[in-house]
């Protein structure tokens, strides 16, 4: 477990029929308004998408695959503040 600007980052695995892929699950833990947390989520997804677009156009880029986005509530769905989860490829590196 680690922390980033979006919130807590957990390590996990994304299972396919062929293999298991190491992933980072970024979970919002900020006390900000939901709209601000959604903007941060959009920024994370947009940066991953732009990196993918650069790679497809032939530019050299470090691409991180995004596998999914989810919303959960600590209580019942729709009650209280939701947590947003972003599932991305986990890279082994030091620092950011």
Image (spheres, grey):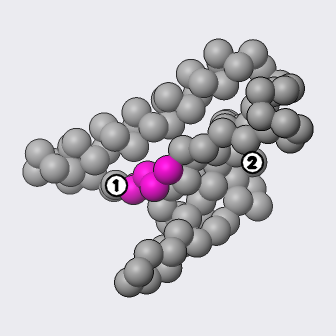
Question: Magenta region, mostly helix, strand or loop?
Answer: strand
Queried whether the magenta region covers residue 18, the answer comes back as no
Q: x%, y% of residue 57?
A: 11, 45
Rounded to the nearest angstrom, the CA distance separating label 1 from label 2 is 21 Å
- Apparent side of residue 37 relative to residue 68 in the rendered image (left or right): right
Residue 92, compared with residue 55, is above or below; it is below
Q: x%, y% of residue 26?
A: 64, 48
Residue 4, compared with residue 91, is above or below; it is above
- Apparent side of residue 87 relative to residue 11 in the rendered image (left or right): left
Q: Nearer the viewer, residue 89 or 91?
A: 89
The residue indicated by pointer 1 is 63
The first of marks 1 and 2 along the sequence is 2
Badge 2 local density, few (<14 within 10 Å), some, or many (20+)?
A: some
Badge 1 local density, few (<14 within 10 Å), some, or many (20+)?
A: some
The residue indicated by pointer 2 is 8
Region in magenta: 64-68
Q: Which of 17 and 92 is in front in this view?
A: 17
How many discs appear? 2
- Does residue 4 appear in the picture of this structure? no
Residue 55, compared with residue 93, is above or below; it is above
- Apparent side of residue 29 relative to residue 42 in the rendered image (left or right): right
- Does residue 94 appear in the picture of this structure? yes
């Amino acid at each position: 477990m680690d922390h980033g600007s979006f919130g807590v980052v957990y390590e996990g695995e994304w299972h396919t029929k062929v293999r298991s892929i190491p992933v980072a699950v970024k979970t919002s833990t900020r006390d900000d308004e939901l709209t601000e947390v959604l903007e941060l989520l959009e920024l994370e997804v947009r940066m991953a998408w732009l990196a993918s677009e650069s790679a497809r156009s032939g530019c050299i880029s470090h691409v991180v695959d995004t596998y999914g986005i989810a919303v959960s509530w600590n209580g019942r769905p729709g009650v209280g503040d939701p947590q947003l989860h972003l599932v991305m490829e986990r890279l082994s590196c030091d620092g950011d």
